Image (cartoon, helix red, strand yellow):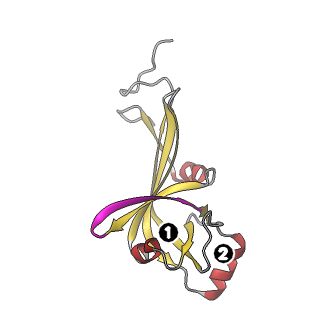
Amino acid sequence: MYLNDGFRELDRQECEDLLAKVPVGRIVYTRQALPAVLPVNFRLDPGGAVLLRTSAASELAHAIDGAIVAFEVDEVDGATHSGWSVVVTGRATVVTDPDEHARLRRVGPRSWVPSPKEVFVRIEPELVTGRQLVAGRTMYGAHLAP
């Protein structure tokens, strides 16, 4: 379905398929009462949870544990004016269970900036939304003339 602004809404399965395609997204959270955005690498866990791996001593791990956050991924082609964006909103928690931590060490994301002591953060998806801009559509949804 196309929206009035020329974007197509993506269903949850389409959003999860796109999330699984890219290695880097952006976590949106609150830092000192202000919005903050950080690029992070991640992996999608079976069931749709977003998994991050970061330093146990990081400001990020402390700021998001137990908080509602947003996580965004996208792919945009400026030449064709096409692309997509997916946003996952949910509660982030640091994984504390030793068995789950061991499992994630085997199958979870690998940190691009390893540290001596790392933790995994799971974002449980409470709301998953996505939009796709199809090349050749105007902001009103009509096709552009060739």
Residue 44: give its label. Answer: none
Residue type, mark 1 in image? Ile
Figure check: 83 above or below 13: above
Q: Are marks 1 and 2 in contact (CB under 8 Å)?
A: no
Of residues 133 and 32, which is closer to you in this image? 32
The residue labelled by disc 2 is: 104
Relative horizontal placement of residue 110, taking residue 31 as reference (left or right): right
Q: CA distance from mark 1 to mark 2?
A: 14 Å
Relative horizontal placement of residue 120, taking residue 72 as reference (left or right): right
Q: Is residue 35 magenta?
A: yes
Q: Residue 117: x and y, percent?
A: 59, 80
Q: Residue 50: x and y, percent?
A: 55, 65
Q: Residue at x 51, y 78 (%)?
A: 94
Mark 2 residue crowding within 10 angstroms, few (<14) / some (14–19) / many (20+): some
Q: Which quadrant would residue 109 be assigned to in this image?
A: bottom right
The residue labelled by disc 1 is: 123
Q: Residue at x 43, y 73 (%)?
A: 59
Q: Residue 52: x and y, percent?
A: 56, 67
Figure check: 116 above or below 60: below
Q: Quadrant of the N terminus?
A: top left
SS at circle 1: strand
Q: Residue 47: x and y, percent?
A: 59, 66
Q: Which quadrant would residue 6 be assigned to in this image?
A: top left
Q: Residue at x 55, y 80 (%)?
A: 95
Q: Earlier in the sequence, mark 1 or mark 2?
A: 2
SS at circle 2: helix
Q: Is residue 52 magenta?
A: no
Figure check: 46 above or below 140: below
What stretch of residues is rendered in magenta? 32-42
Furthest-right residue in this view: 106
Relative horizontal placement of residue 123, taking residue 37 as reference (left or right): right
Q: Residue at x 57, y 67 (%)?
A: 51
